Image (cartoon, grey):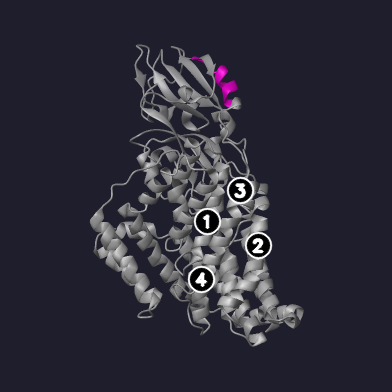
């Protein structure tokens, strides 16, 4: 019915707006769309929930487990050590090395994880070589994106489109079916970045002072507690002064000179000298508080906010962190991360003036943390934060390396030679890795990015709804009417262009799920092979260079690289147009009509 088609278009249009505005997380929107399709009767219960049992969803979940097991062996740290040894090389050689290394790793491991692994090392190299991180982090992200399209396992988008093709009765993608065209993109993109891209990359130094680099929005103040203070002997936890999180106690110096670390149960005594951070409003109130005398307002520098046992660290909020959209206060950050204190923050969209304790955390935010070497380990082990101011060393477990890499080789080999489908080999590989104790069952559950799994299940319903109601066919007929007379190459070019434009403002997986069924309908309408059109959608959905929110790796490097939105437009737009031209002529060579 035509009414159903318009309902589907309306729901998808609403979803695209939500994807663009980022009012809700992508997985929340995707599941919401799935529910709406079922409530309106577009999809029945079985059809609506089919995404959870789709081969793509299961394969992606299994590969998360295998990838995590590989990381745990420490073998990938050898790449970090190799990159560290590149210090002293020219900027061009560093960019070349970065892109090739990130590309090779991303061909078999999730590209977001690759950037997370290498980013601390790249920042260390930039400091050691006195090269602005803005010159190196964008090549790192772009190289990972290009490498991700070289094999089926490189990114969840490849697996998603393969699953859509399989559901439509078409052959699934082979493990290395994309490799030849993917390598063309990787080599061409690398050449662009070491020539034109290098010239366009911003030369923007990291801001030096703490108050310049992060939205501290606070003052460092030393206050003295006199006998008139009404909450003497009471622990910090019960003090009105510190209860709402707007004033933070960093250190207490007792009357006898002893320095006391501040814990929730630490009592406040007469004669204490307390070093605190406070915003301007609360500082004014503090001056009027009975029993509190302001001794000094100190400059923002590391010596002012640390002591002998604790120092400052920087950490980035990861794209799928559970901390996103929560505040420091609501998650009880200090208790969650073993007495780690947040004393500064910089938001992806710029600096903001709200209280740090009430600031809503977003992907790519940088947190300035104060912690001991022992307590910072809780952050280092977390999937929610990426520590970028320290490089961690992992001891190599040779036995686990051989077992884990052997399992991965079997997973890829058996699927590549057609012995078993990739979904089966991936699931079997995850089970074997757990059985070999390369990773524990509980670690395996934690390794799976459930936000991605729910997002995949949700966005698959968009394609199902378009196909069931005839919406995909209707859009396909419209595209053919406009471009069909120019031949299939021009139609393919239009699909590639539309996909990379969409994926720069919304989820790459959502773009692929939306356009893959349309690509299948267009190929049927033109009476040509579907493969080149599906490949156009697959490649374009992952080649997102024009915006920091277009792909997760771009979001991760945005703040550490001190980038601006226009930097991505300046470097990424010519690259996307370059790839558009390459795809128009290259894809039909490797995947004939």
Q: Secondary structure at mark 4?
A: helix
Q: Residue at x 46, y 21 (%)?
A: 275
- Crowd tier of the residue under label 3, counting other residues whose Cα lies within 10 Å: few below 14, some 14–19, many 20 or above: some
- The numbered mark, 4 or 2, whose residue comes first in the sequence reads 4
| Magenta stretch bounds | 282-293
> Rounded to the nearest whole Å, what is the CA distance between mark 1 and mark 3?
13 Å
Distance, label 1 to label 4, CA atoms, is: 16 Å
Q: Which residue is mark 3?
A: 198
Q: Quadrant of the C terminus?
A: bottom right
* Pointer 4 or 3: first along the chain: 4
Q: Earlier in the sequence, mark 1 or mark 3?
A: 1
Which of the marked residues, 1 or 4, is nearer the chain's N terminus? 1
Find disc 4 in the rendering and name its residue: 180
Mark 1: give few (<14), some (14-19) or many (20+) Cα within 10 Å: many
- x, y percentage for residue 10? 68, 70
Residue 32 vertical placement versus 559 (above, below): below
Mark with earlier residue (3, 2): 3
> Residue 214: x and y, percent?
56, 34
Where is mark 1, residue-wise? Answer: 143
Question: Which residue shows up at 62% across the image and 77% down it?
Answer: 519
Query: Image quarter for residue 267?
Result: top left
Task: Identify the residue at horizontal 41%, vertical 12% (top origin).
Answer: 271
Front residue of 495/127: it is: 127
Residue at the spot of label 2? 578
Q: CA distance from mark 3 to mark 2?
A: 15 Å
């Amino acid at each position: 019915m035509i009414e159903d088609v318009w309902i589907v278009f309306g729901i998808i249009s609403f979803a695209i707006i939500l994807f663009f505005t980022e009012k809700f997380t992508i997985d929340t929107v995707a599941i919401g769309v799935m529910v709406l399709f079922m409530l309106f009767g577009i999809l029945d219960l079985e059809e609506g929930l089919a995404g959870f049992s789709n081969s793509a969803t299961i394969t992606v979940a299994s590969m998360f487990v295998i990838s995590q097991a590989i990381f745990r062996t420490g073998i990938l740290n050898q790449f970090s050590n190799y990159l560290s040894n590149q210090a002293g090389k020219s900027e061009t050689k560093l960019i070349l090395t970065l892109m090739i290394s990130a590309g090779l790793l991303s061909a078999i491991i999730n590209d977001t994880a690759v950037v997370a692994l290498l980013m601390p090392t790249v920042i260390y190299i930039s400091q050691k070589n006195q090269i602005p991180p803005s010159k190196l982090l964008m090549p790192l992200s772009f190289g990972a994106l290009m490498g991700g399209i070289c094999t089926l396992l490189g990114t969840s988008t490849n697996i998603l489109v393969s699953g859509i093709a399989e559901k439509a009765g078409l052959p699934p993608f082979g493990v290395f079916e994309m490799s030849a065209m993917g390598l063309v993109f990787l080599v061409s993109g690398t050449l662009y970045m070491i020539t034109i891209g290098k010239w366009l990359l911003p030369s923007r130094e990291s801001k030096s002072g703490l108050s310049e680099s992060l939205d501290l929005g606070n003052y460092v103040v030393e206050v003295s507690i006199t006998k008139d203070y009404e909450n003497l002997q009471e622990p910090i936890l019960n003090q009105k002064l510190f209860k709402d999180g707007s004033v933070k106690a960093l250190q207490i110096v007792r009357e006898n000179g002893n320095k006391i670390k501040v814990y929730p149960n630490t009592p406040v005594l007469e004669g204490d000298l307390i070093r605190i951070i406070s915003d301007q409003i609360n500082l004014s109130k503090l001056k009027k508080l009975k029993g509190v005398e302001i001794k000094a307002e100190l400059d923002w520098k590391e010596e002012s906010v640390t002591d002998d046992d604790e120092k400052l660290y920087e950490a980035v909020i990861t794209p799928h962190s559970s901390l996103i959209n929560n505040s420091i206060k609501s998650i009880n950050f200090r208790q969650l991360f073993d007495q780690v204190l947040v004393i500064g923050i910089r938001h992806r969209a710029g600096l903001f003036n709200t209280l740090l304790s009430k600031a809503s955390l977003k992907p790519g935010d940088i947190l300035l943390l104060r912690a001991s070497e022992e307590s910072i380990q809780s952050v280092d082990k977390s999937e929610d934060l990426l520590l970028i101011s320290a490089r961690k060393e992992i001891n190599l477990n040779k036995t686990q390396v051989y077992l884990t890499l052997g399992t991965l080789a079997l997973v890829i080999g058996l699927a590549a030679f057609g012995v078993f489908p990739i979904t089966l080999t991936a699931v079997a590989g995850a089970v074997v890795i757990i059985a070999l104790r390369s990773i524990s069952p509980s670690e395996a559950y934690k390794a799976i990015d459930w936000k991605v799994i729910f997002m995949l299940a949700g966005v698959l319903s968009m394609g199902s709804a378009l196909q069931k109601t005839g919406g995909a066919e209707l859009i396909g007929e419209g595209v053919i009417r406009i471009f069909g007379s120019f031949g299939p190459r021009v139609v393919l070019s239009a699909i590639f262009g539309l996909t990379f434009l969409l994926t720069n403002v919304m989820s790459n997986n959502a773009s692929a799920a939306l356009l893959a069924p349309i690509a299948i309908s267009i190929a049927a309408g033109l009476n040509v092979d579907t493969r080149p059109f599906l490949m156009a959608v697959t490649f374009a959905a992952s080649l997102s260079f024009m915006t920091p929110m277009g792909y997760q790796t771009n979001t991760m490097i945005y703040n550490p690289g001190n980038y601006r939105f226009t930097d991505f437009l300046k470097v990424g737009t010519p690259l996307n147009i370059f790839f558009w031209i390459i795809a128009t002529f290259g894809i039909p060579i490797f995947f004939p009509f």
